[in-house]
Amino acid sequence: MENVIIIGTGCAGWTSAIYTARANMNPLVLAGEQPGGQLTTTTEVENFPGFPEGVMGPELMMRMQQQAEKFGTRVEYEMVDSVEKQGDGNFIVKTQGGTEYHSHSVIIATGASPRYLGLPNEMDLVGHGVTSCATCDGAFYPDVPVCVIGGGDSAAEEATFLTKFASKVYLIHRRDELRASQIMADRVLGQEKVEPVWNSEVKEYLTDENGDVRAVKLYNNQTEEESELEVKCVFVAIGHDPNTKFLEGSGVELDDEGYVVQDGRSTHSNIVGIFSAGDVSDHVYRQAITAAGNGCQAALDAERYVAGLEG
Ligand code: NAP
């Protein structure tokens, strides 16, 4: 029987692991398909305190993992299928590989995944000119025009990064002002290669004879005109959805958008013994540092809960 199982390995998961490991809870971390979470697909993180010179996202995650393992955290690379509360108050966590783990408590730190537009051929085109990760795929498109869809910090960051490779970066946004923070907005709009395309929505991905993206069909929602924009790759940066599908049937309360509901004062979910941390519960702040802070809170809440069972 485990004291605590932590599901997820982003900032929230690793911070929960560091704290529960240092509290002698001997945590087990179940790492999913994208170990390290969203920071593994980002470039330089400039706003994590303690790194005045910045730190690369994947390096920050690797260092968090090392810190967690240094204090005895165990890691299994398995996708969780379900979490069930048993009659005795403990939990069975089942993985897609068929393993069953038993635990007194569970911390859900599964984060969120990039959202796509939902166009008919979109998923078939991932890897053929549609992607959500500039860091992963930007270098495959040197000296050709590309576009980024979205108006938030992610879109601004991706478009800025892509100027290193592409000949031109169109920033397609459905409104006429960016949602991104001022510093990121100023930075991206100040790039020579970046051209904003305001009030515009991508209605179709157009492909060449090889089945790769050659252009997008745009709809201007002010003039109601349609046009074609030639691009070799589309970087979709329109936000994220929480990774909570495996919680269907668990009884854990989710809000309308699928985020785990915390009880307001702590990281407790509605199920006693299940806690959550980071982007899986947060559609407001969603920063590396807030996820880490919430991971610490979940660890302290779980520690108190398990101590109470023993006491
Ligand atoms: P976001 O702030 O939610 O922005 C999503 C953008 O996509 C918005 O501009 C939105 O348009 C647009 N959008 C949403 N659905 C769309 C659709 N179906 N079609 C077209 N456009 C659509 O998401 P994010 O940029 O991923 O950022 C998430 C959080 O992470 C934020 O808190 C952000 O500050 C943080 N972040 C920080 C950094 C950094 O500081 N280095 C980098 C990346 C992200 P509207 O504006 O019209 O709603």
Image (cartoon, rainbow, N blue to C red):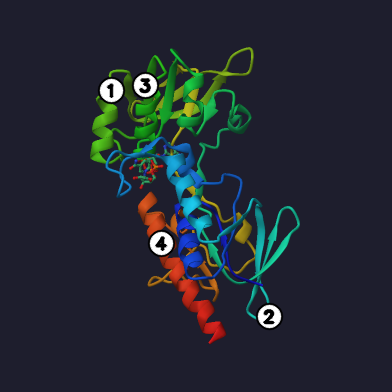
Residue 227 visible within the image: no
**Ligand 1 is located in which of the four quadrants?**
top left
What amino acid is at disc 3? Answer: Thr
- In the rendered view, tell whether residue 125 sits above or below residue 3: above
Q: Position of residue 97 (x, y in %)?
A: 74, 53
Task: Kindly check if marks 1 and 3 are in contact, taking CB atoms under 8 A apart as contact.
Answer: yes
Q: Earlier in the sequence, mark 1 or mark 3?
A: 3
Dot 1, crowdedness within 10 Å: few (<14), some or many (≥20)? few
- Residue 130 screen position, x and y as percent: 54, 27
Residue type at numbered disc 2:
Gly
Is 57 rendered above or below residue 207?
Answer: below
Could you say which is closer to the camera, residue 17 or residue 143?
17
Q: Nearer the viewer, mark 4 or mark 2?
A: 4
First of labels 3, 2 by sequence position: 2
Distance CA(mark 4)–CA(mark 1) = 35 Å
Side of 108 relative to 84 (left or right): left
Q: Which residue is mark 1?
A: 191
Q: What residue did someone put label 3 on?
A: 163
In the picture, the disc for residue 87 is 2
> For numbered disc 4, what is the local secondary structure?
helix
In this view of the protein, can residue 241 be seen by the observer?
yes
* Identity of the residue drawn at 43% across and 37% down: 42
Alpha carbons under labels 2 and 1: distance apart: 59 Å
Residue position for label 4:
294
Asked which secondary structure carries label 2, the reply is loop
Disc 1 to disc 3, C-alpha distance? 8 Å
**Which of marks 4 and 3 precedes in the sequence?**
3
Question: Is disc 4 surrounded by few (<14), some (14 to 19) or many (20+) residues within 10 Å?
Answer: many
